[in-house]
Structure formats: C-alpha cells, structure tokens
Amino acid sequence: MDIVWNNLGAFLQGASVTVRISAVAVCFGLIIGSIFGLMRISGSVILRSIAGVYVEAIRGTPLMVQLLYIYFGLPQIGVILPPFTAAAIALSINSGAYVAEIVRAGIQSIDKGQMESARSLGMTYMQAMRYIILPQAFRRIIPPLVNEFIMLIKDSSLLSVIGVIELTRTGQRISGATYNVFHVFTAVAVIYFIMTFSLSKFMGYLERRWQIND
C-alpha cells in the first residue's frame, strides 16, 4: 500500500481531471439532451426527424468510436482539438442522446390533461411547458439522470486512449512504473466508487428535499 500513499497526489490529480471533464460533459449533455428531448415531442416532423437521427446514431455507435472519430478523424478535415476538449465534446454529445430520451419519456409521462387544462386557462404552449409540465417531469427523471451521470463518470475511463491524464490513465502510468497492478487499480476502483457513491447520495438528498417541498 506504500505505492498508493506515495502516489496519492497523482491519484487525486487524475481524479480531479475526471471530475472536471465529467462536470463539463454533464452540463452540456443536459443542455443538449433537453433541447433534443423537446424536439423529439415537437409537432414539427422536421425537428422530430433531426432529433431522431441524432439519438439513434449516437446510441447506436460505441462511445470509443465517437471519441476516436472526434480526436483522430476531425484533424483530417482541418479541425484539430486538444485531448481535453475532444473528450469533453465526445462525452457531451454521447450523454446528450441518452438524456434526450430520458427527458422525452419524463415529459410524456405527465398526464396530457394537464397540458389541456393549462391551455384552457390561457397559457401558451411554452408557458404550460415551463410552469406546469417541465417542473413535474424533472422530478420524475432525476433517478435515470443520476444513473446516466454515474455512467458518464465511469465512461470517462475511456479517455485514456487519446492521452487525457484522468484517473484510469494515471493508474496505468503508475502501475507501469511500479509493476504493481493489484494495489494501484484497487485504489483507482475505490476512488471511482467514492465519486459515484457521493453523486448518488447527493442526488438522492435533492430528490427527497424536492418531494418534501411538494
């Protein structure tokens, strides 16, 4: 275990990169997913088709392929991105497709009569969505969103293939230098568990608070 303690600073630095890049991807993934989730239930055939193509294309291809395409493929058409930026874009786009389906399902789970009642009271469609439908839908989609965000943190381990020095890559470098895989990746697994468990507990706390407020 001395190897772990002697390299604790490196582990924490790798974990901080994982947290930062995951936080960026969560924020942009939520924005992208919300937009495309609303497009999925839009009255416009064009918007629904665009959103459908995006969701199916992203969910139908591996994250690794998307990551390699953005980092190694785009430079061939003149778009060169640093590893961190490419990783954040790939994770955001990938997460957005899954969040879009979560948002769509959450909105469609609200009784249609609530929209009809809101419109009969003189609200516009956007006002009804903003004040009546979306607040209720958001509370319902918290559990699947938490699962998606936890998966995002774990999926960030793939970023090591493009040279992002996140937690998994840090473990690879330390184990390669010390030839001690067992202790090093035990520490890596424990750190991942702490991050995902903390996120799960925090979101569970927020969910309980919102239920009490309701």
Image (spheres, grey):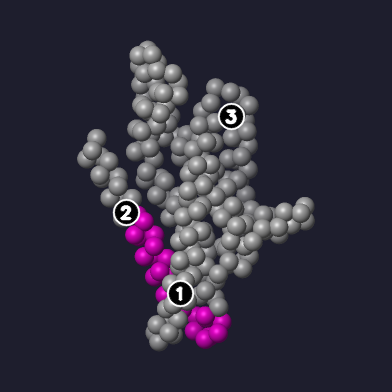
Is disc 2 surrounded by few (<14), some (14 to 19) or many (20+) residues within 10 Å?
few
Q: Is residue 24 left or right of residue 117?
A: right
Percent x, y of residue 201? 31, 55
Is disc 3 surrounded by few (<14), some (14 to 19) or many (20+) residues within 10 Å?
some
Pointer 3 or 2: first along the chain = 3
Q: CA distance from mark 1 to mark 3?
A: 44 Å
Q: Does dot 2 land on a helix, a strand or a loop? A: helix
Magenta span: predominant SS is helix
Residue numbers of the magenta segment: 174-200
The residue drawn where x is 36% and y is 26% is 132
Q: Which residue is mark 3?
A: 48
- Observer-side mark, 1 or 3, equals 1
Q: Amino acid at mark 3?
A: Arg
The residue drawn where x is 49% and y is 65% is 17
The reply to whether dot 1 and dot 3 touch (C-beta < 8 Å) is no
* Residue 186 in sight here: no
**Residue 192 magenta-highlighted:** yes
Percent x, y of residue 130? 40, 29
Q: CA distance from mark 1 to mark 2?
A: 23 Å
Q: Does dot 1 land on a helix, a strand or a loop? A: helix
- Observer-side mark, 3 or 2, equals 2
The numbered disc on residue 11 is 1
Q: Amino acid at mark 2?
A: Phe
Q: Amino acid at mark 1?
A: Phe
Pointer 1 or 3: first along the chain = 1
Is disc 1 surrounded by few (<14), some (14 to 19) or many (20+) residues within 10 Å?
many
The residue drawn where x is 45% and y is 74% is 11
Percent x, y of residue 53? 63, 37
Q: Quadrant of the C terminus?
A: top left
Vertical arrangement, residue 191 with respect to residue 108, above or below = below
